[in-house]
Image: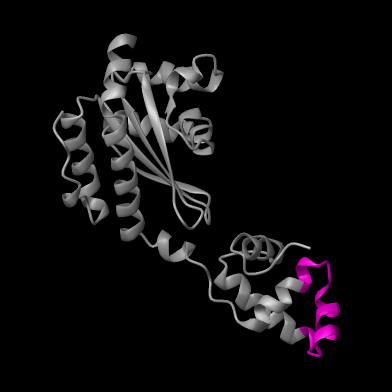
Amino acid sequence: MELIDLGHDPDVPGQIDAFLLQLREKLELDHLAYAGMNPVSNSVHGYVTYPDAWKAHYASSGFVTIDPAVHLARRSIAPVDWKRFDRNDDFSKVFANARDFGISDQGLTIPVRGPYGDTGLLSVTRDCSPAEWQLLTRKIIGELQSVAVHVHDAVMRSDKLSRLLRTPNLSTREREILQWIAAGKSQQDVGDILGISHRTVEVHLRSARDKLYSLTTPHAVARAIAFGLIYPI
């Protein structure tokens, strides 16, 4: 097995598709797909070697909302062989369609967890016998795990997602107000406790929501707790 030179991993999204095509040939696979999960917008962005017709059909059918190779694998910390989904109705639905586009339901997904709550999934497929598949995955699993980390890192470095997910720089007052809100106090209560006006409390909350990319104050509180900026009470 030829080693992949990860020193030439992609630095911009435009190079990722070409990088995956190179990996497909070197690892003797039918297809590779990378999906990145954005916890801020709850969206999925990705790069795949699948045929354009299948990509369009997958998107128009809304399969991303039910595909267990995305939703179940993202909750795992270890590589997930798709044979685990043999009795999953959603998996059967997705890949009954995929077979019409020449895509095998024999695959593997490797999850990667980043430092900002981000998740990346590298999935690979090959149409071969179960015995051949087992031998192949044993042979390349280590390389695939390294590739998954490098591709996710490349996407994060080249995407504004990484900037969105870095720990927000809240002021002392913003953290203080969110902490009181987390304790169940109303905005009026917080103003009375801190000796500031209700209007000033709202100004600080609006700033905190903006920095935390949150539409609501409860969401801002939840994200601040997740970042360790305040503490649950």
- Frontmost residue, 80 versus 41: 80
- Estimate the x, y position of residue 75 in percent, counting from the top left: 54, 37
Find the magenta span and give its range.
Answer: 180-198
Q: Quadrant of residue 220?
A: bottom right
- Estimate the x, y position of residue 144 in percent, counting from the top left: 30, 35
- Frontmost residue, 68 versus 102: 68
- Frontmost residue, 203 versus 61: 203
* Residue at (86% x, 78% y) in the render: 189
Q: Quadrant of the C terminus?
A: bottom right
Judge whether residue 128 can be spotted in this image: no
- Estimate the x, y position of residue 34 in percent, counting from the top left: 35, 40
Does the magenta stretch mainly form a helix, a strand or a loop?
helix
Q: With 28 as the anchor, is 129 left or right in this view? A: right
Instruction: Tell me if residue 199 comes above or below residue 223 in the rendering.
Output: below
Q: Quadrant of the N terminus?
A: top left
Does 194 lie within the magenta span? yes
* Residue at (66% x, 79% y) in the render: 174
